[in-house]
Amino acid sequence: MNDYREAIESGRLRPGELLPSEPELISRYHASKSTVGKAIAALKAEGLVFSQRGRGVFAKRRPSIRRIASERYRADMEPQDTPQTSFTAEQGIAWQDYRLDRTYEWIEADERLAELFGVAAGTRVLERRFVFHAQGEPTQMSRPCLLASDVEGTPVADPDREPWPGGTIAQLRSIGIVVDDVQESVSARMPTPEETATLSIGSGVPVFAITRRILAQGRVVEVADPIVIPADRAILDYHINLG
């Protein structure tokens, strides 16, 4: 089945294209039903195919979304001729192809969140949980939190205002907080059961887990911990200027 793996990764087998049926694969490779089943399961675990009951096994979309850490937030800083965010810009999608599922909750910061903000544990925080969809497909999860002292009682705390063109940076600018620094740290790990189910991640596919801090004049004004992206759907690019 290596030829199917190569065909999907190279793009010769297009997203949504149907693979041969199990009997056809058994005949083509002179293999047992068990061997073919294990091969298909391996392709599913790698996130290369998906199955639909009664229809068969299909090649899965393998986008190479480039998340350019040092440049991506410029989309949120620039004037908005048409609605966009850093997410829609890197996905290359129009605003109407973007959907954001969200839940908002007021919480007290635990030790980790407090340390990332540089505040005392127990500080009141607005916890937001987002699932980002591009053209109907869930592609990213995040937990961006804001300090209640900054946003409580403002439009930024209203979930019905989402999605907000320009994202968090534009939200904060609307209440007089001008962002001038973004810090990110990236790790790789296996997804949680919730992440696997929400993002339809193959059983063998890891995720990028990103912790982001947004600052204004040296003060942390947002912490997103974590931002979760399936590792088979993204390339993390970094631009380091030594001049």
Image: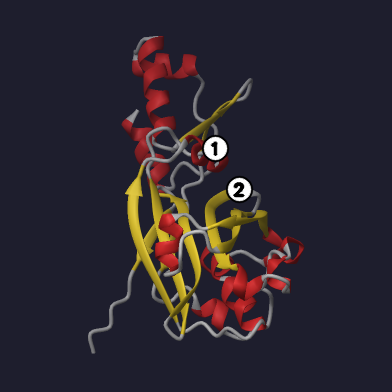
Residue drawn at the location 37% of the way across and 36% of the way down: 5
Badge 1: residue crowd in 10 Å (few <14, some 14–19, many ≥20) = some
The residue wearing badge 2 is: 137
Task: Quarter of the image for the C terminus: give it.
Answer: bottom left
From the top left corner, tell me how far across and down residue 56 is, in percent: 57, 24
Q: Quadrant of residue 153?
A: bottom right
Amino acid found under the numbered disc labelled 1: Glu
From the top left corner, tell me how far across and down residue 71 is, in percent: 43, 76
Q: Nearer the viewer, residue 77 or 110?
A: 110
Badge 2: residue crowd in 10 Å (few <14, some 14–19, many ≥20) = few
Q: CA distance from mark 1 to mark 2?
A: 17 Å
Q: In the rendered view, would you say 29 is above or below 197?
A: above
* Label 1 secondary element: loop
Res 36 seen here: yes
Residue drawn at the location 51% of the way across and 21% of the way down: 21
The residue wearing badge 1 is: 17
Amino acid found under the numbered disc labelled 2: Glu
* Label 2 secondary element: strand
Q: In the rendered view, would you say 84 is above or below 10?
A: below
Residue furthest to the left: 242
